[in-house]
Structure formats: C-alpha cells, structure tokens
Image: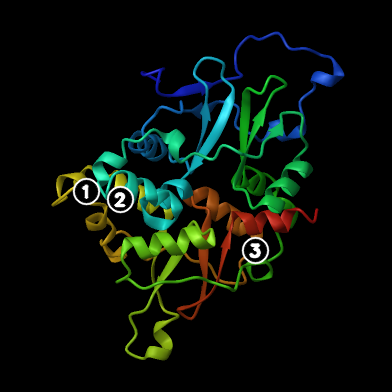
Amino acid sequence: MKNKTSINRKSNTGAVERETKVHDKEGDIMAIATRDVISIPPSKSIKDTAKVMMEHEFRRLPITDPGSGKLLGIVTVMDILDFFGGGKKFNIIEKKYEDNFLAAINEPIKEIMTRDLITLSNKASIGDTIETMLANQLGAIPLTDSEGKLAGIVTERDIALSLAGMAGKETVQDYMSTKVFTTTPGTPLEGACKIMVRNGLRRIPIVGGEADISKAAKKLLGILTSTDVIRFLNAKELFDHLNSNLATDVLKTVISEIMVEDPVTVEPTMTIGELCELFAERNIGGVPVVKDDKVLGIITERDILNAVKRY
C-alpha cells in the first residue's frame, strides 16, 4: 500500500527458507487461509477503517502493532454498526462527543476493537477451526505463529466454499434458519442497527408492501446488510448533505434509502453445492429463502459450515 504507516500487509510469499522440523509444520488450515493479510494499526481512525473495509470488501480487519507485527485485536463491521447506534459503543458518540457524529468518527479504532479475541495457531487443523468457529459464533479467526505475529486469517466463507462439495447434494431447507428477523422500509437506520447488533445479524430482510396486513409480514422487498450500512456511512454524499454534525440526523435515515432492492434469493430445494456456487459468483454470504414470494427462512455461510462439519 502507498501509506505503510496506516495499513500493514503481512505476506508469507517470497524466497524464504523454510524449516522442515516436524514441530514447525503448518496445519492444514493454512491451505485455505489467506496468508497475505491486510491489517491496520490501533491509531487508525474509525472513519478511515471503514474506508479500508469498503475498498477491499472486507467484513473484518486485524489490528496489529506496526513495529512488532503482533496481533492486538480485531474490528468487524458489527463493531462499527454497534458504534453507529446499534449498541454500547454508541456511547462514544452520544456521551464523549455529545452526539457530534463528525468528531466521533475520527476516534482511533482501538476504542471499539475487540481486544480479547480468539485466535488459533497456524498449526491448527481444519476440523479444530470449524469447531472453534461454531462454538464461539465467529465469522473469522486470525492465525498466529509461535511469536504471536499474524500469520493468516481464515473465514467462514473460506471453509464453507472449500468443503461444500462434501454436502453438495443436501438442500437449503435442511440447514436454513426459519427464525428470521425482519423489518420494514420505514425503519430508521438506528432501529435497524439495533436489530442487527443485538441479534448478531449481518443482514435483515426488508418486508411489507401488501395491502393485506396478513401478507405484509412475509413479502420480500429488499435486504439490508452490515456492509450496506457501512457503505452508506462511508459515502462522501452523506457528509456533503449533513445539515448538522449530529449523529441523530444520520440515524433518522430510513432504510428504504439504503437497502438493496430485488435481492438475490433461493428456493428451499436448491442444493448446498449450488448455493456455494451462487455465493462465490455473487460475492455474498447469505440469502433469504423464498417460495411463492414468501420468506421462509435465511441461509448463510455459517449454516453451510454446519452442513460440512458432519463430514
């Protein structure tokens, strides 16, 4: 990167002489992990961190010490949603900066990063990684070497897509979640963020639009993802049109202005193999399951992980 003080890239490529001792052997998780990891220093602002996420289409960024390369923490899109009104981290805007949105977004990312994070050694197995992810509801795990330095990162998607062939003939309806949190197009951004953060959701279907109230709760109109929210908050147009510096002005935005209309959906009979091909092709991590215009459930990369763990 151009600014090496603001983004650190850890690469394991190049002509490096490797040890052949048994105890230095990497685990099979490194075969599917990302080794060329972009990380950021703890001093980087929340605003600039969101920009890095959008530029690289990341949902998370490791935080490393610029000098030693040691892993200090991690920040996810959910941390930023929490900060923008979904949870306790909103206190930084509301109390420390008295609702001054533009001042608060220049806080260093260390103020909202997760410090007590779960990591695995770069000698870990794929099986151990799957168990750790599912047991702790993690979307990704940083991998460290014997010195505590960042050696790689592995995500739900990495594992799910690499092993999907094992469960390729099983169907979406076997693993989808039928408990679906939804909201309506008129919901303010603050309300949507709270739904997502409190329930650990990276996406929520937007429903309504039927004259018949009994049908309104099921008809799919769009979808809102954590990435959509970060993209909106990161947009230059947002700052250009702010009438004040107040966070409340931003959080009053209704989600119909942000949501993705006509989202990708699948039917319950689609196979897991076909679903993984769709995820890879469209670069998405979850979709509503729809039949006859009704939302029956939602299926995500984590559900695929549950499918492949049986094998």
Q: Is residue 22 left or right of residue 51?
A: right
* Mark 1 or mark 3, earlier in chain: 1
Q: Amino acid at mark 1?
A: Leu
Structural crowding at the residue carrying mark 3, measured as other residues with C-alpha within 10 Å and reported as few (<14), some (14–19) or many (≥20): some
Badge 3 marks a residue whose secondary structure is: loop
What residue do we see at 40% from left, 18% from top?
5
Structural crowding at the residue carrying mark 2, measured as other residues with C-alpha within 10 Å and reported as few (<14), some (14–19) or many (≥20): some
Question: Vertical placement of 205 versus 54: above or below?
Answer: below
Where in the figure is residue 239, as x and y percent of width and height? 20, 45
Disc sitting over residue 232 in the figure: 2
The CA span between labels 2 and 3 is: 33 Å
Q: Which residue is mark 1?
A: 238
Query: Can residue 261 be seen in this snapshot?
Result: no
Front residue of this view, candidates 14 and 191: 191
Badge 2 marks a residue whose secondary structure is: helix
Q: Amino acid at mark 2?
A: Phe
Where in the figure is residue 190, as x and y percent of width and height? 34, 61
Question: Vertical placement of 133 versus 33: above or below?
Answer: below
Is disc 2 in contact with disc 3, using a CB cutoff of under 8 Å?
A: no
What residue do we see at 48% from left, 66% from top?
265
Is disc 1 in contact with disc 2, using a CB cutoff of under 8 Å?
A: yes
Question: Vertical placement of 285 versus 127: above or below?
Answer: below
The CA span between labels 1 and 3 is: 40 Å
Q: Which residue is mark 3?
A: 271
Front residue of this view, candidates 215 and 132: 132
Front tag of 2 and 3: 2
Is disc 1 in contact with disc 3, using a CB cutoff of under 8 Å?
A: no
Q: How is the image coloured?
A: rainbow
